[in-house]
Image: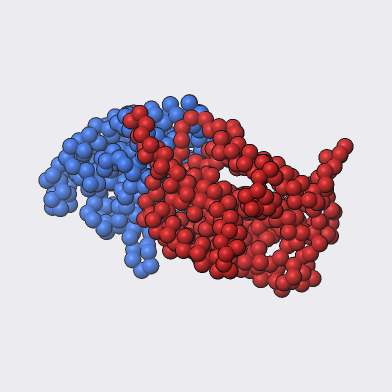
Chain colours: A blue, B red
Amino acid sequence: MALFEATRLAKRFGDQVVLEDITLSFEEGQLSGIMGPNGAGKTTCFNVLTGRYAPDRGRVTFAGEDITGLAPRAIAKKGISRSFQIMNLFNDYTALDNVLIACPRVRAQGFNPWRDLGADSAAQDEAAAVLARVGLKGKASVPAKSLSYGERRALEIGVALAAQPRLLFLDEPTAGLGSEGTARLADLVRELKRVVTIVIIEHDMKFLFGLADHVSVIHWGQVIAGGTPAELKENDWVRRSNLGALA
Amino acid sequence: MQAKSGRAALIPVPLVITFLLLLTTPLWVSRVGLYQYLALEIMIWMLFALGYNLLLGYTGLPSFGHGAYFGIGAYAFGLLQLKVWPNLWFDLFGAVLVAAAFGAAVAAFISHRRGIYYALLTIAFGQVFWFVSIKWHSVTGGEDGLLNIKRLPADFGFFSIKLVSNEALFYFSLAIFTLAVLGLWRLIHSPLGRILSAIKQNETRAAFVGYNVWLYKWLAFTLSAAFAGLAGALFAMAQNSAYPNVMSLQNSGFVVMMVLIGGGLVSFWGALIGAAFFILARDLLGAYTETWLLWYGLIFMAMVLFKPEGIAGMWQAWKAKKPREALPPNVITIDPSDTLSAAEAKHGVV
């Protein structure tokens, strides 16, 4: 059984059907990708998988447990974490504090009035380690809003990573990055892949095909193809859509 | 507000200064042309404003009906004293609990909202309580209010202290005030303070890293209502009465203005400065003109236009300007477009 399974998901907004019938599964230890043209329903799919929206129909299970329709915080506590395409950081906080607030040990102390995070060196070290991992070692005390775009992208992943997830969803992590930034991000993701199961939505096929073990193609709210990057390169739709040519 | 690293002081210096300044008022207050009761009133408003700032400054939730919980504290103190048991500790504690309970109930209805909807709901609830206080004659005394609320003696078992004089009540309130501020200071510097501030900055992300945003928002409102209730109870003693005016929209607006002018958005101590500034302005400007609120309103507008970080923000900017061994400036800037409270400050609450 796969770590994460979504079965026959459907979602619509008003009379617009965005997800028709989505069945996906992600194996533990793998890096899975989701691709598809603009407006295919990728981001909605992601939002349903991570609890931002409840699906109208279908079932989502994580490690054998039904998590359909749970609130984002409940899903987060089960060990699923996500980053955002449109960056969602704590802008006034330093890079370190952004990561710190996402650490499970801090979350567990939320209602303890005698704790002082400023003096909690274990938590600080933990957060510093996460920052180092995403390449922001020297930026710990810089407010998130003062970081460069690429650094904010990295911090976006850092905050998701700080929750020590078993499954990490990345929503278009290369959005807005230049080729150099994308290359650096690819190195980071390759590194992370060794320790955590990852699912990536991506436009950049070259990036995705270079990293993923398995890719699903979504179009018209359905999964129209799936397989390893090598298999997909032979796929008719991928070839015709010209996306494969990039890979 | 930016979180600082390093352990927060157990007893912060600004509190010591405030404490000493207040403690010595009986020695100098009449020499500068003021009077002891004024110091008492300032302290009560400081307490109210500090608790309110937990909600506005730290959690970024604008409540424009917070006078209601101040008033509920005052009425509860009076009613408990007149109808249940005239014991200072019981009545004081009871007033805090009742205000917190009302706050908790209202918070349960509004904590899924934010921004303008949140603000409107707080006004609506505030107006409901204000209206009830006017109309429910048999309990609240209607527009006259509850009269003959006594300054009960502080009974410590083996001895008891009379609080009838303004000085005695002042010292008693100062002790309560100091304890309350220490408690709030600790709370702000526990993980709770950081989480509230994180929620202010980005509610969505806070939920996705696993926080129960609703519960934290609910708690912030309830706690600030409890502080308002404590201030209200002391106010009922100071005034020997409780009356509908303290629950009015106008009074709710005053506490917002105090926090914003003082700089509650950038500093824990801003609320203290703002409360002192407001009450002093009221008395000093009020001595010259009946239309003092007009002038105060103009000051308020100038402030939010040119220095939305308030008096505390000016202080921080001034301190940052002083040359120090090439340290990065310590000033915390608020981008008016990205914090809701500053945006509201812009539009004014006069």
At x 72% / y 72%, what residue is drawn? B143
Drawn side of residue B241 relative to residue B46, left or right: right
A245 vs B336, nearest the viewer: B336
B205 vs B299: above or below: above
Residue A215 in view? no
B143 vs A208, nearest the viewer: B143
In the image, residue B54 lies at what x, y percent? 55, 48
In the image, residue A212 lies at what x, y percent? 25, 37
Q: How many marks?
A: 0
Drawn side of residue A221 relative to residue B143, left or right: left
Residue B181 in view? yes
Drawn side of residue A204 relative to residue B80, left or right: left
Pick the quarter of the image with the N terminus of chain B: top left
Drawn side of residue B316 relative to residue B96, left or right: left
At x 34% / y 52%, what residue is drawn? A45
At x 27% / y 41%, what residue is drawn? A148
A176 vs A99: above or below: below
At x 17% / y 40%, what residue is drawn? A179
